[in-house]
Amino acid sequence: MTAQPTRITIDPITRLEGHGKIEIFLNEEGDVANTYFQVPELRGFEQFCVGRQAEDLPVIMNRICGV
Amino acid sequence: MTAKPKLSMYWAASCGGCEIALVNINEKILDVDAAFDFMFCPCLLDTKYKDIEALPDGDILITLFNGAIRTSENEHMARLLRKKSKLLIAFGSCAAEGCIPGLANLTNKRDILKTCYLDNPSIDNPSGETPKPETEMPEGKLCIPEFYGSVKTLAQTVDVDYFIPGCPPEPHQIWAVVETVLNILQTGAPLPPKGAVLGGGKSSVCEECERKKEDKKITGFRRTYEFVPDREQCLLEQGVVCMGIATRDGCGALCPKVNMPCTGCYGPPEGVLDQGAKMVAALGSIIDIGDLKGMKEDAIDKKIDEVISTIPDWAGTFYKYSLPGSIMKGRVA
Ligand code: SF4
Ligand code: SF4
Ligand code: SF4
């Protein structure tokens, strides 16, 4: 029997707003050794809102999440 | 009984508002469910990417693709769903023209990563890490998508059959498209010509706007926080930059109805290549700087500058939703 850690990938995680992925690593006993939650998306609102008109920000920011 | 045709919906660089707009057709969603096997939509259903990869090519009848192409995953999913779908529809402004995520084309990848991960006051990042496609962890390699240098539209990435405008598309327009599709399925009526914009009008928002329109001559612009506009008269005539004149109709002029200017979410009108250029051309013909007789050229320039300087952010105003899909596509230098 090989004793390689096994990985379970949940991609994508669903029924929420946004993109997410979970990697679960199992140890030799088959128990969870470690889990990583990843957000494989970025749009950069923090940066591209700079320079926009203040009165436009409610129009722009509500496109962060429409759910 | 033959299997129902498959319908999928995917989000790339998006906000999820397009999915909610689909659900906002309310109980008619049951008709969609009756006619289609709605089998993929991460916002609403638990289907995994590997399930899509396992499908034969062309197995999905229609994919509604919302979201812009910002990362390598967005591009991968666009290519995958193109292959698996008979009809790929760019659903909403993000997929059709880049929309709000496309404003990132006014900046660059380096500055975005710096602001979001290094300078952001709410992030604790002492080692100064920014996201990388691959990271070695003790348990194994972790992979995330590559963040591209700029935002692209769906049609700049893969072949697109149809476009549905709006941020988001209005539910009554979504339903109109669904009805058309159902009719085609039931009667065998011909498909609309490839590349057609569905779920929108062929004119501009002004066409649907019930405000009183007179001679448009403006001597300066006013910003929405400076005054409460009259509710009857055209907003542009009152000096508010209303994009209705350069925006496709279809929403029912929702924003002017509540005394807010149209910001352009339905994209350019039929046949117009560049929404911002159309708006600038329209403004050029209505700005009135008075009697020029006897005035020197630099004095005229100064007067024009005075008027247009009352719009502080041209790119963000004229291309709020359409920058990646525009002629310039973004900042040039
Ligand atoms: S088009 Fe608008 S509503 Fe749809 S995903 Fe993009 S930002 Fe959200
Ligand atoms: S410019 Fe705006 S307010 Fe004026 S008619 Fe067009 S949509 Fe209505
Ligand atoms: S008025 Fe303009 S910004 Fe408002 S919903 Fe209609 S097209 Fe979009």
Image (spheres, helix red, strand yellow):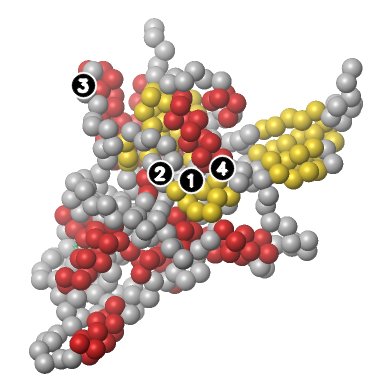
Quarter of the image for the N terminus of chain A: give it.
top right
| Mark sitting earlier along the chain (2/3) | 2
Neighbourhood count class around disc 2 (C-alpha, 10 Å): few under 14, some 14–19, many 20 upward: some
Labels 3 and 4: the sequence-earlier one: 4
Q: Position of residue B117 (x, y in %)?
A: 66, 60
Chain bearing tag 2 is B
Vertically, is B241 above or below B269? below
Whether the residue carrying mark 4 lies under 8 Å from ligand 1 is answered with no
Q: Confirm if mark 1 falls within 8 A of ligand 1.
A: no
Residue pictured at 26% horizontal, 55% vertical? B247
Residue B138 location, quadrant: top right
Query: Which element carries disc 4, helix, strand or loop?
Result: helix
- The disc at residue B69 is 1
Q: Looking at numbered disc 1 in the image, what kind of residue is underneath it?
A: Ile
Q: Residue under label 4, please give it.
A: B72
Q: CA distance from mark 1 to mark 2?
A: 9 Å
Give the number of the mark in front: 2 or 3: 2
Is residue B197 shown to the viewer in this render? Answer: yes
* Percent x, y of residue B265: 34, 54
- The label on residue B320 is none
Under mark 4, the amino acid is Ser
* Residue bearing the label numbered 2: B156
Question: Dot 1 falls on which chain?
Answer: B
Along the polypeptide, which appears first: circle 1 or circle 2?
A: 1
* Residue B231 percent across, percent down from the top left: 22, 68
Mark 1 falls on what kind of element?
strand
Separation (CA) of disc 2 from disc 3: 29 Å
